[in-house]
Image: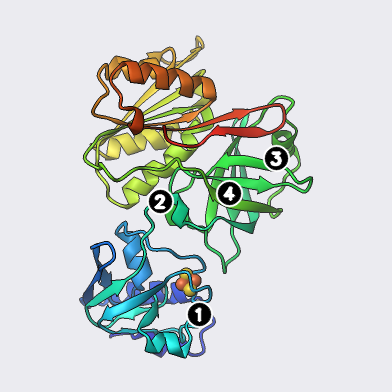
Amino acid sequence: MVLSLESWRKGYHISDNTLRLIFKTVNNATNRSMKQFQVKNINSGAIFTVNEGESILTAALRQGVMLPYSCKNGTCGSCKGKLESGEVHYPFHPPLALSREEIGDGSALLCQAEPIENLVIRVREIEAVRDIHVRKMPARVIEKTLLTTDVMRIKMKLPSAQRLQFLAGQYLEILTQDGKRRAFSIASAPQSEDVIELHIRHVEGGGYTGWVFDELKERDILRIEAPLGTFFIRNDRAERPMILMGGGTGIAPLKSMIEDLLALNDKRPLHLFWGVRNHAELYMQQQVQQWAHDHDHIQYTTALLEPGKEDQAGDFTGFVHEAVLQKYPELSGFDIYMSGPPAMVDAGRAAFLENGAEKRRIFFDSFEFGLDVPVRVLAKPH
Ligand code: FES
């Protein structure tokens, strides 16, 4: 049995993506060998493969080619590109965000278009944060889970017609009703773009984080602005191994980065160092240990600052940047990413520079939980 998407379209009130999934699953089950098409973007030289029944955008993102997009349902026009050669079709509905003239001109909506032969396209790829639109949108709280006595995981779902494109490591701001903004790193990977995860530490005397802990409820709607910041993985020297160093909830953007690298099958060596006060604060220990267990290119070290009697012997006792230096006394060959409180970032930066790290290859996101507001002090590479 061979399914065609068109044959399913009429009369079924299910989303395009669900339909695509059904199509793929059934065709896989019937052992039909899927056709594949090659797509080349002449703007960047990137070449990727699109499976039959897959949109050009989905295939590009799956293979780490960062094409711009927003709604992913054919209405916003963000993913528009030019077809230089080859033909596409639109199995679900006509490309709403394209005029007749644009179609005649060779434009295509890459979130909806599927190739019927090999293609050459021309489209701008996202190379830096300046290429991504910062947008305001509502987000519904769908999960609130206490991870430690003072860290809460919040998961938020975006409206079905909206997607958030961001680079792993970036942060968002929650816009509060009193006109303030609270910044939080995004802990989920860009691949899970309609569910956003945050790790929020409760700050003593901190009104907003207290509100998140005590009053925010599942199903509440928050207003967010995103994505923000320039803390993201650099790919210009992708042969260099990476050190990722996080303090406390500073693990959140590093989690996003690692999940993104894994999703892209990027196997450059990385060593994650997570510094906390004691073992009880390692709130995603199992998950990180699993990464290190499953992937030879990932190493993991914990640094406990004040291990209690009940703590098992940790990997290292002391400041987390000291754990890095103990393992790597010479740092000239590494790209270093740091996320956490300013004191940790400052100490790490000074020590790493003394030990050979290149100033331009140290990237950091330093944030401080002030009286009431997490203030993002710095979010740029130096
Ligand atoms: Fe909105 Fe394609 S992403 S039209």
Callout 3 touching callout 2 (CB < 8 Å): no
Residue 207 visible in rendering: yes
Pinpoint residue 366: horizontal percent, then vertical percent.
Answer: 52, 30
Label for residue 155?
Answer: 4
Q: Nearer the viewer, mark 2 or mark 4?
A: 2
Query: Gap between marks 4 and 1, in whole Å?
Result: 31 Å
Label for residue 212?
Answer: 3
- The residue where tag 1 is placed is 97
Pinpoint residue 232: horizontal percent, then vertical percent.
Answer: 41, 43
Question: How many residues crowd around disc 1 within 10 Å: few (fewer than 14), some, or many (20 or more)?
Answer: some
Query: Gap between marks 3 and 4, in whole Å?
Result: 12 Å
Q: Earlier in the sequence, mark 2 or mark 4?
A: 2
Closer to the camera, 52 or 75?
A: 75
Q: Nearer the viewer, mark 4 or mark 1?
A: 1
Query: Gap between marks 3 and 2, in whole Å?
Result: 32 Å
Label 1 CB-ligand 1 distance < 8 A: yes
Residue 111 shown left or right of residue 215 in the figure: left
Instruction: Look at label 1 and name its amino acid.
Output: Ala
